[in-house]
Image (cartoon, helix red, strand yellow):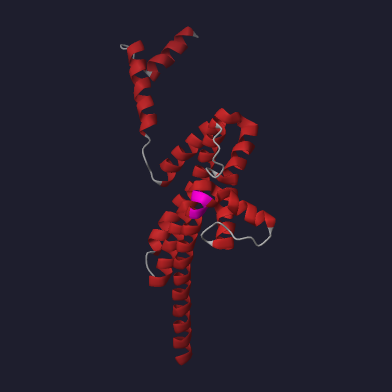
Amino acid sequence: GGMLRLRAFSFEKARQSGGVFLILFSIYLLFAFLSHLINAGTADASVLQSYSGQTAVNSGGYFGAWFSNLFISDGFGLISLCLPFYFFLLGYSLLENRFWELARFTFPYLFFSLYWFSGSLAYIKLVFDLPFTDLGGGLGISMNEWIAQFIGRVGTGLLLALSVLLFLQVEMGAKIRLFSRVGELFARWDQSLAPNETYDPAEMKRGQTTNA
């Protein structure tokens, strides 16, 4: 009994310690990301490439520059700002041992958003030739260039639009009004072209037999 209580106590302490660590790490990441986006973007990259030990401009120091370069410049771009908030949610869930359902519910939306916004913002950057390299990150640019090899730039934009519509339809069960509006328009058009005609399968079958 004493051993079980000791193990339960140790697990409880480990869980709470992990929660505190994730909370502090999320705050650290947020300040490092903001510093990178505001004034340290290219400076962070130069510090990492030089290996000279020079002082990093990033408010998070060398590791702040490294994480920012990993997640923003080489990774998902601006949408990476969502990561510290999700890490904070995970940390608080560990600390309090609650809100796990919220963390589980949020994860697929975060996962999809990271890749979709990375690709979409990089698409905007490439189409309009914007100078802001961290818009969609290196991953978003790589995805756009790879997909464009097969379906072109226009096809890439259509694929991005289709993917978000399908995600909303599947994950949220959202009724896509655009498709229903198009269906209503086709129905009105069809009725206006043939207002007095009705389709009777039996009548059509008799007509085919007579012609034969």
Q: Is 149 or 83 nearer to us in this picture? A: 83
- Residue visible at 49% across and 54% down in the picture: 35
**Residue extending farthest front:** 55
Q: Is residue 146 left or right of residue 208?
A: right
Task: Tell me if residue 38 can be seen.
Answer: yes
x and y percentages locating residue 193 in the rendered image? 36, 11
Residue 148 sits above or below residue 64 on the image:
above
170 above or below 98? Answer: above
Q: Position of residue 181 (x, y in %)?
A: 35, 27
Q: Nearer the viewer, residue 83 or 115?
A: 83
Which residue extends farthest top? 211
Q: Which residues are the magenta region? A: 35-39
The residue at the point 54 percent across, 43 percent down is: 136
The image shows residue 92, relative to residue 179, as above or below, that is: below
Q: Position of residue 148 (x, y in %)?
A: 61, 33
Query: Which of 211 and 132 lies nearest the eye of the viewer?
Result: 132
Q: Residue at x 33, y 18 (%)?
A: 188
- Residue 38 in the magenta stretch? The answer is yes
Is residue 154 depicted above or below 136 in this figure?
above
In the rendered image, which quarter contains the N terminus?
bottom left
Q: Is residue 151 magenta?
A: no
* Spot occupied by residue 201 in the image (x, y as percentages of width and height): 39, 19
Residue at 55%, 60% in the rendered image = 64
Q: How many marks?
A: 0
Residue, far left:
196
Identify the main secondary structure in magenta: helix
